[in-house]
Amino acid sequence: MAPYTPTQYLLDHTFITQTLHKLYTLLDTAQFPRLASSEVFTSPTFQLDYTAMFPSSTNQPTVTSPQAIVENAWRPLISKMVSTQHVMSAVVVYGLPVPGTEVPDDGDKGGEVREATATAYVIAHLCKRAEDGKGVVMTSNGGIGEYKLVRMEEGECRARWAGKGSWDGNCWRVSEVKVVPKWYEGDVEGILGQVVPL
């Protein structure tokens, strides 16, 4: 056991927040290889829960791989859009101990925390070319994202790094995502299809 230092607390909080922001930034900028590379999500699988947003025959969360969700869902949807923008705010991280708390030792790095959770407000704007080719149609929605994150091994993170330049030092990855919508506006069904009524 070793003390969890204030520096480690601040680094973990920053890296967790960065991982969540990176998810939506890579999605909106269509950087699909990076999304599929386990730079954001755990590999080989993570859990995605859209049951509060989209109808499902099982009404259960989906266990999928980063590659599968990118190629089968996100790339096809984003590719149809003129533009998308996900705005995340009010990120709150849970599960990090108070600095000074004894946690499992990780050699010369001191104590390390392996798991955490987070919540955030997320607003999504999606713009699609109108069917007549004149202008765009748009839908927006807002809600709460609920996330579970795990710290992966440094060697695995380095090996899977797909970003520009050298590895950024962040080992936190998303293992579970739950989307809880609170409101919709605009042409919801025309862009997203059928959604679960609020």
Image (cartoon, rainbow, N blue to C red):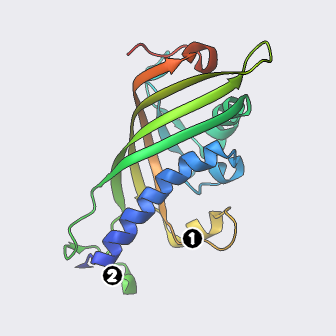
Q: Amino acid at mark 1?
A: Asp
Location of residue 88 with respect to 13 vertically, above or below: above
Q: Is residue 52 among the parts visible in the rendering?
A: no
| Residue highlighted by disc 2 | 110
Check the picture and name the quadrant holding the N terminus: bottom left
Check the picture and name the quadrant holding the C terminus: top left
Residue 167, quarter of the rendered image: bottom right
Disc 2: CA contacts within 10 A as few (<14), some (14-19) or many (>=20): some
Q: Amino acid at mark 2?
A: Gly
Q: How many marks?
A: 2
Location of residue 4 with respect to 29 vertically, above or below: below
Q: Secondary structure at mark 2?
A: loop
**Cα distance in 3D space between marks 1 and 2:** 20 Å
- Residue 90 image label: none
Residue 130, quarter of the rendered image: top right
Give the residue displayed 65% in from the left and 49% down from the top. 36
Location of residue 39 with respect to 10 vertically, above or below: above
Query: In this image, 11 relative to 158: left or right?
Result: left
Residue 183 % position (x, y): 41, 23
Closer to the camera: disc 1 or disc 2?
1
Query: In this image, 34 relative to 96: left or right?
Result: right
| Residue highlighted by disc 1 | 168
